[in-house]
Image (cartoon, rainbow, N blue to C red):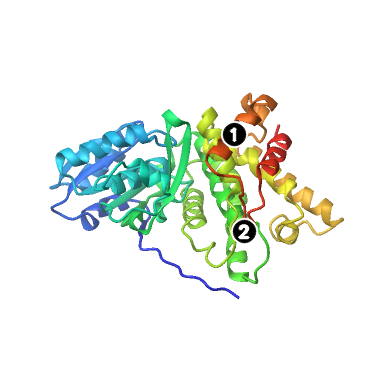
Amino acid sequence: MLNFDFYNPTQILFGKGRIADLSKVVPADARVLVLYGGGSIKSNGVFDEVMAGLAGRTVFEFAGIEPNPSYETLMHAVELVRKEKLDFLLAVGGGSVIDGTKFVAAAVNFEGDPWAILEKRGRNITQALPFGSILTLPATGSEMNDGSVVTRKSLQAKVAFSNKLVFPKFSILDPTKTFSLPVKQIGNGVVDAYAHVMEQYMTYPVNAPVQDRFAEGLLLTLIEEGPKALANPEDYDTRANIMWCATLALNGLIGAGVPQDWSTHMVGHELTALYGLDHAQTLAIVLPSMLRVRKEGKRAKLLQYAERVWNITEGSEDARIEQAIQRTQEFFEKMGVKTRLGDYKLGTQNIDAILKHLESHRMVTLGEQRDVTLDVSRKVLELSL
């Protein structure tokens, strides 16, 4: 029987032209810091729309937040906010920019070393600056949740944290702002969202048909719409459906009241921290092997997944499970995301370093049953070669 709390205070403004609504949702007297990444928002017109929406407010800007935002970079933003006494943050970009902005929001008035926020996984956050986001790359769902992942380059550590105080106050989702994304980022975004759903769905049955059907609907939509986005990047309806899928995949709703896994993500984080792989690339590598190695513990849900998502109903149980995993892997490849360590010039020689990092970050009992030990992670990585 389900028993859970669900809380999500983020206001979503969805549709074409919604950046103009900034004037309604950002306080008129706000001192705003606009945070973004590499600067594409200045060449595609988004920055000009943002500035028009913020007209009349004091506005500073901070550029250069990386994919997998770094602690080192974000601390420069923290210093700017403190120096200029800014009181509202606006993230303009994808999940990395939004994740980074969450850290800045929590760190500005944090007492002590802000690295402690990450060491304590956000449990010690007692206040945060208000912020909103404008999403330009659907993938992580950070625009409607209270989670963030930050990398400290000097330690080669990629660490997640969460706290209810870092929910965005609002998020603007305009699908037209995704039209100019490179093909690689389209594929990465779909794979990222797909893996988010799988980490909450692919566990064991708990009599939660609403969450199961919701999750399966998101997976089916991504399977149907993902290839369309690659073929026709400026189809509004396709991009809108993918954008909304990515948001719903990690806003807490499909995970409410059900067990969650996240072992694929934890192993994947180490691949990014050590070797710089895109987050979605790590998920595409690890997830299929994770499912194969842990087939017995996930048997019931794997069979359900095979039937409901891939329409696989014939053959032995093991054959159906393997076919479903293979179809998943083929889908990732179809989206342009390779699924083997060897595709990224990694091999057996890298596995010990990954396991050492998992151990140093206390990632030694992962998964919904806490049974993904270092030995299991080794098997997963070896199967991913």
Asked whether residue 136 is in view, the answer is: no
The residue sitting at 30% across, 36% down in the picture is 75
Q: Position of residue 39 (x, y in %)?
A: 33, 31
Quarter-wise, where is residue 70 in the image?
top left
Name the residue beneath numbered marker 2.
201
The residue sitting at 16% across, 38% down in the picture is 83
Identity of the amino acid at label 2?
Tyr
Upstream in sequence: badge 1 or badge 2: 2
Identity of the amino acid at label 1?
Lys
Q: Is residue 271 left or right of residue 303?
A: left
Mark 1 or mark 2, whichever is nearer to me: 1
Q: Secondary structure at mark 2?
A: helix
Q: Secondary structure at mark 1?
A: helix
Marks 1 and 2, how far apart at CA: 29 Å
* Vertical comparison of 122 with 34: above or below: below
Q: Position of residue 122 (x, y in %)?
A: 39, 51
Q: Position of residue 33 (x, y in %)?
A: 23, 42
